[in-house]
Amino acid sequence: VTVAASYRGRFAPSPTGPLHFGSLVAALASFLDARRHGGIWLVRLEDLDTDRNQPGAEDAILRCLEGFGLHWDEPLVRQSERQELYDAALQQLRQAGLAYPCGCSRKSLAQAEEGMGGPRYPGTCRNGLPAGAIVRSFRFKSSEMEITFKDRYQGEFRQNVGLEVGDFVIKRADGPFAYQLAVVVDDAAQGITDVVRGADLLDSTPRQILLQQALNLPTPRYLHVPVATNAQGEKLSKQTRAPAVQPNPQTLKEALQYLGYTLPQDLGNDLNQIMNYALQAAE
Ligand SMILES: [Zn+2]
């Protein structure tokens, strides 16, 4: 293992519900990777979508992380307190001609997409708002250049964002900044060198790389861990009613085994001891 001089990683949960097994796996993977590299590990709350935030969820997540021994090294960051940073990024993109106002309603887009056979924005407002349209969102002008990156777990990943996704929303006019923009701004502002997260976000990484390039920000290394699923093969999430996890030795063992750790039979049932074993095994 090469030790990065300045490894900085993070776990970025949304306070839309308590931690479930899938989010525990992602947190653990990121924490162990940071520790294994002698690095700093941060927690950032992705709480921009205030309609979906659940009262008490932030506290529940943080208490659960601490209960498992996942201690963060610097003060918590909340995206809801960082609007001016995202605003500055949007201004920078608009001034560079890389973001534009879009007047399309979700309904009109759904009709347009039906005709095109895919969830790709047809570029209706790229060269100016249609007459009489009101601004509903701001979109990033995606380039039709293939983005390639080497994921530390998944290997090489390629996507042509311009052709496959089209120009994507970075802010709703009357709502929050989109995840794609906020995450890019925050990863750079916090000096994140290594993003370790669930593979459900693999597909949005090329969009984030495009934004990093447009904003002259560095691209971190990425590692996307397989997403935990339930017996029906669905991703564990609030939508699939994944049960909340509580700090206990058995759950920690299951999460480590999910990540590929082989645990000795005589490891015992002390949470700290299990975590110490994982930290040493990772070295
Ligand atoms: Zn539009």
Image (cartoon, helix red, strand yellow):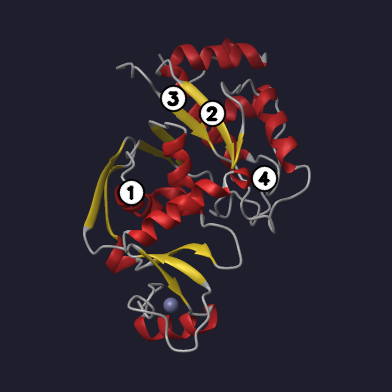
Of 23 and 169, nearer the camera is 169
Query: Which of pointers 1 and 3 indicates the residue nearer the eye?
Result: 1
Q: Residue at x 48, y 21 (%)?
A: 40
Real-space CA distance between mark 3 and mark 2, rounded to the nearest whole angstrom: 12 Å
Q: Tell me: 42 left or right of 260.
A: right
Q: Earlier in the sequence, mark 4 or mark 2?
A: 4
Give the residue number, with chain letter if any, for mark 1. 209
107 left or right of 218? right
| Any part of residue 251 in sight | yes
Point out the residue furthest to the left here: 145
SS for dot 2: strand
In this orientation, which residue lies closer to the viewer: 114 or 225?
Answer: 114
Q: Classify mark 2: residues with Cα within 10 Å, few (<14), some (14-19) or many (20+).
A: many
Q: Quadrant of residue 225?
A: top left
Q: Which residue is mark 2?
A: 42
Q: Amino acid at mark 4?
A: Pro
Residue 83 or residue 211, whichever sits in front: 83
Between disc 3 and disc 2, the foreground one is: 2
Report if the CB atoms under discs 3 and 2 are less than 8 Å apart.
Answer: no
Marks 1 and 4 close (CB-CB < 8 Å): no
Q: Earlier in the sequence, mark 4 or mark 3?
A: 4
* Helix, strand or loop for disc 3: helix
Q: Residues within 10 Å of mark 4 (few under 14, many from 20)?
A: many
Three-letter amino acid code at disc 1? Ile
Q: Where residue 110 appears, x then y in whole percent?
A: 48, 81
Picture coordinates of residue 3, whole percent (x, y): 33, 16
- How far apart in space, not on screen, are marks 1 and 3 (Cα)? 22 Å
Please state the horizontal and vertical placement of residue 52, each as a whole percent of the image.
Answer: 68, 56
Q: Is mark 4 within 8 Å of ligand 1?
A: no
> Are the residues flagged by discs 1 and 3 in contact, CB closer than 8 Å?
no
Residue at the disc numbered 4: 15
